[in-house]
Image (cartoon, rainbow, N blue to C red):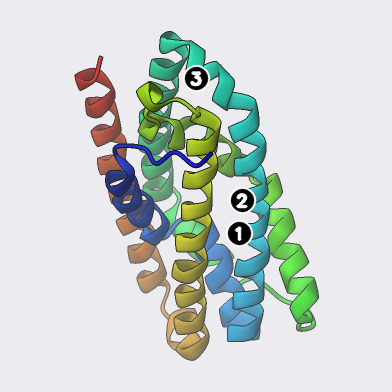
Amino acid sequence: MVVIPTRIWEYVVTAFLIILAPGPTVLFVIARAISWGRATAVASVLGNNIGAFLVSLLIAFGLGPILQSSTTAFLSVQISGGLYLIYLGISAIRHSEVHAGDMKNVSGEKPSFSKSARDGFVVGVLNPKVWVFFAAILPQFVDRDRGHVTSQLVLMGTIFAVIAFFSDSTWGIIAGTIRNWLANERKRLVAMRVTGGVVMIILGLFTLWTAIRHH
């Protein structure tokens, strides 16, 4: 049974802002686009989002029953999610120049579409930030009064994967089109990373405020 959370549109907006903000996944995709072009970037996005969606399913079926039965666990997850977003934002700003430099270091023979998808899948599954995100951010939008928490988490994980695919693919296509312009100007990459960091901090503060307000 599919249950739609009360705050679903608030979740969609939040997910869109988090996905749109240039973070590790976006930098990974842009790096592939700069080195090997748009097709490689899109293939990497496809694999990455399949991997991340798999993580969301594992967490939904493992975490759902706990959140359904424990108010304390639910509040803890909300607070952890807010703090984690703030941490990601600060980290992004502090290491923006390092990450920008790393993006230009991808080398080697151009991978096939299937290999690019496999590489993206591995990055998505093994990325610890993906695990923490689905375990700590998504659950705060669950409507416990409507029940079927696991179903709600699966729905939101699906929505996240769809938005992420189109958003990250857009980054990849744009980066593949203007690859020389991006690769040759470090300041542009740094500015993108800092902007993403600021967005993460704002969302983290909003998450903490929401958790406190509802409890």
Quarter of the image containing the C terminus?
Answer: top left
Whether tag 3 and tag 2 are in contact, CB under 8 A, the answer is no
Q: Residue 104: image x %, image y %?
A: 58, 73
Whether tag 1 and tag 3 are in contact, CB under 8 A, the answer is no
Mark linked to residue 67 = 3
Which residue is label 1 attached to? 49
Earlier in the chain: of badge 1 and badge 3, it is: 1
Report the residue at 23% width, 20% height from top. 214
The answer to whether 73 is drawn above or below residue 98 in the figure is above
Q: How many marks?
A: 3
Which residue is label 2 attached to? 53
Badge 2 marks a residue whose secondary structure is: helix
Amino acid at pointer 1: Asn
Q: Residue 193: image x %, image y %?
A: 39, 59
| Measured Cα–Cα span from mark 1 to mark 3 | 25 Å
Amino acid at pointer 2: Phe
